[in-house]
């Protein structure tokens, strides 16, 4: 049993480049989906996104991965610290590309799951507005559909906003 576990970890580490090496955005999307439910995969993804990044979308994935570290942290202080770091990193990503709906989507998904007592959910309405204004410009159809569906299902939207989102 332990050998299978170690073999699984070994295979996972082989699947991703060494620390600091940027993954493609598509590889990062897949890894992030897996990391959301697995602490070890989240740590590996954070390590892979730990080097200098120039792509604002990858910076946003780093921010989201930092927030997930808070989910897996064992103490309230560590949870808070990871979330605080995540919000700083998200600000860098948004500053670098303020119209990018994938960056806004990542931030809105994280902020909508944070407890309100943390006072770190103040960008949801702004992010929703930017997504609605720019969703028609986003060329990646599958990701655009995922973003639209998330807003419809998880974020308070008016009927007019839902009509816009249902087009995608």
Image (cartoon, grey):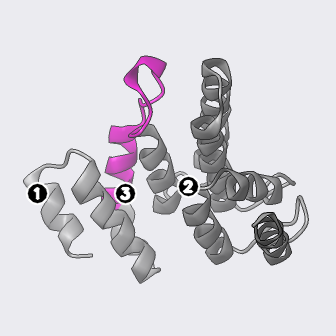
Check residue 36 in the rendering and tell me which mark sits there, or answer none: 2
Q: Residue at x 63, y 56 (%)?
A: 61
Report, in whole angstroms, how far the alpha carbon at label 2 lies from the one at label 1: 31 Å
Residue 146's quadrant in the figure? Answer: bottom left
Question: Residue sitting at 48 percent across and 27 percent down?
Answer: 120
Q: Residues within 10 Å of mark 3 (few under 14, many from 20)?
A: many
Membership of 80 in magenta stretch? no
Q: Which residues are magenta?
A: 112-133
> x, y percentage for residue 14?
85, 75
Tell me which residue sits at (72%, 75%) in the image.
24
Question: Is 99 displayed left or right of 131 in the figure?
Answer: right
Q: Residue furthest front?
A: 1
Q: Answer with the quarter of the image where residue 34 lies.
A: bottom right
Discs 3/2, front: 2
Q: Which residue is mark 1?
A: 160
Name the quadrant of the N terminus.
bottom right
Q: Position of residue 168 (x, y in %)?
A: 27, 76
């Amino acid at each position: 049993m332990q050998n299978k576990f170690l073999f699984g970890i070994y295979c996972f580490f082989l699947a991703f480049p060494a620390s600091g090496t940027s993954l493609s955005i598509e590889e990062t999307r897949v890894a992030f989906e897996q990391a959301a439910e697995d602490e070890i995969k989240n740590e590996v993804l954070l390590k892979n996104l730990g080097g200098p990044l120039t792509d604002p979308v990858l910076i946003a994935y780093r921010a989201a991965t930092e927030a997930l570290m808070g989910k897996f942290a064992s103490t309230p202080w560590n949870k808070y610290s990871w979330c605080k770091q995540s919000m700083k990193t998200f600000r860098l990503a948004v500053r670098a590309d303020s119209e990018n709906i994938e960056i806004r989507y990542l931030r809105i998904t994280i902020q909508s799951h944070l407890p309100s007592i943390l006072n770190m959910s103040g960008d949801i309405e702004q992010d929703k507005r930017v997504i609605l204004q720019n969703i028609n410009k986003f060329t990646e159809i599958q990701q655009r559909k995922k973003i639209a569906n998330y807003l419809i299902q998880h974020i308070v939207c008016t009927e007019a906003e839902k009509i816009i989102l249902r087009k995608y």
